Amino acid sequence: MTSLKRTTLFQALHRTYSDSTVLAIALAGTALFILTLLTLKGQIEQHLQLVARTIAYSAEAAVLFEDRGTASEILVQIAEREQLRAASITTLDGRTLASHGFEGSGLSGHVDEAVGRLLFPDPIGAEIRSGNRRIGKVAVHGNGARFIVYTLQASIVGLVCITLFFYAARRLARRMAQRITNQLQVLAAATHGARLKQDFSRRVPPFDIVEFDQLGKDFNALFAELHARNLELTARQYSLEVANQTLSQLALRDGLTGLANRRGFIERLEQALAEAKASGSKVGVLYLDNDRFKRINDEYGHAAGDALLVEVADRIRGCIRDTDLVARLGGDEFTVLLDSVRDVEDAILVAEKILAAMVPPLPVGDTMIVPGVSIGIALFPEHGRTADQLLIAADQAMYTTKQNGRGHYRIFDPAIHRLPTSGD
Ligand SMILES: Nc1nc2c(ncn2[C@@H]2O[C@H](COP(=O)(O)OP(=O)(O)OP(=O)(O)O)[C@@H](O)[C@H]2O)c(=O)[nH]1
């Protein structure tokens, strides 16, 4: 697998800008340099033309009278002043009246001469006239010295300009790349933060680059949507939790009396037993059954029976501590959980309190009834170690109370009662 060479956006942009700047400067510089050389050559040729004409004008009389001395003097004077490679004055019939050859000395002299030969291989001429009559001609050969000097000057100026331009372009490119990456970094940070923290309340600021600004607006709209959905989900989750709690409360409650039901009672009893096992304390369980309840139903109706059950539930609740629990197991059966009792005496006290609470009669139909109850008592750990064993023990004790005349309490007695073993 080929490994992907990674680079930051800033590096990529900066490199691209720098490369294209160098290329543009190199191309423009080269074109400008060539143009400068051509212009320079043209200018020097025009100057040579002017020099040839000046010689022709100055030497007119000397040529007319074929005065070689004066012609030569004029030629040498101008040729040396103008640093010509060579110059000559000839008559119309081709005789040379004067000639001059510039001999360069040293390396620079030879270079000047070689460049002159290369750039101006042909002589530049001018006619010598006397009135309207042609009487001779001048030929001059250009030297490279002037061209080299001008070229060097143009190159130095060009190089300085190019360097300045390059640094300015580099700075601009850097600033541009920085601007783009900064805006992209803000977008990236917002997206990253939103993903990591699931926080869609963040918003990105407006950007001056249109495309990024549009992207930022889209991000903000998306974040706002996700934020609203998140809030909606949280609200839904909350109401589901509340509904779940209510349902589980209902599942553990008795609909008629509002007391805990069998499931709620067993759950709480198991909790109390676990704590008691850990702390070495005792737990009491009271099993209550209304006496002759069927008769009340039969004589006064089911609604009257229900009202009596609710009243009995209230009276039992009034007899226990907040830390204890009353439950309706079903029908006319109730249980009481006594948390952290010291001994059986504590349970007996509660049972007696409940029996006393039943004494006041309550109106049922057109008569007054005393809601009698029979109670069985069992204690952890003496009469059972599990919730089931304790309930059975208390139930058996309650059953014995019923058999012995009702309206009393009885404590589980292992000598009389028998707890089921795991095989029963
Ligand atoms: N009103 C009413 N009656 C109920 C409800 N659940 C059960 N019962 C009745 O309660 C009566 C329970 O009677 P039992 O406990 O069997 O007998 P009892 O008449 O109380 O006699 P002993 O328990 O022996 O004193 C039955 O008639 C059931 O139909 C209820 O929710 N409301």
Image (spheres, helix red, strand yellow):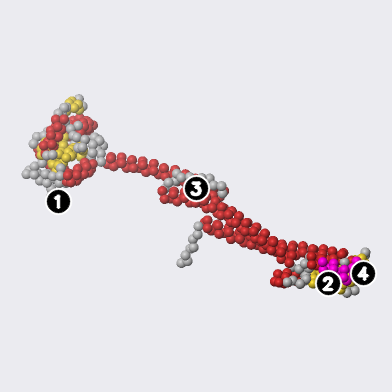
**Quick one: SS at disc 2?**
strand
| Residue 373 x %, y % | 14, 34
Q: CA distance from mark 3 to mark 1?
A: 66 Å
Identity, as a three-letter code, of the amino acid under mark 1: Ser
Please report whichever mark, 4 or 3, sits nearer to the chain's N-terminal start: 4
Quarter where residue 276 is shown: top left
| Residue 346 x %, y % | 13, 36
Q: CA distance from mark 3 to mark 2?
A: 87 Å
Checking the image for residue 422, the label placed there is 1
Q: Residue at x 50, y 57 (%)?
A: 8
Residue reaching furthest to the left:
415
Quarter where residue 291 is shown: top left
Residue with the mark numbered 2: 99
Indicate which label's residue lies in the foreground, 1 or 2.
Answer: 2
Q: CA distance from mark 4 to mark 3?
A: 98 Å
Instruction: Tell me: 61 left or right of 87.
Output: right
Instruction: Tell me: 196 left or right of 42.
Output: left
Q: Residue at x 23, y 39 (%)?
A: 260
| Residue 75 x %, y % | 83, 68
Please report whichever mark, 3 or 1, sits nearer to the chain's N-terminal start: 3
Task: Determine whether label 1 and label 2 are within 8 Å by CB.
Answer: no
Residue with the mark numbered 4: 65
Instruction: Tell me: 149 left or right of 193.
Output: right
Task: Determine whether label 4 and label 2 are within 8 Å by CB.
Answer: no
**Quick one: SS at disc 1?**
loop
**Quick one: SS at disc 4?**
loop
Relative to 277, does residue 134 appear above or below in the rendering? below
**Quick one: SS at disc 3?**
helix
Relative to 251, does residue 88 appear above or below in the rendering? below
Q: CA distance from mark 1 to mark 2?
A: 144 Å
Residue with the mark numbered 3: 219
Looking at the rendering, the stretch of residues picked out in magenta corresponds to 61-77
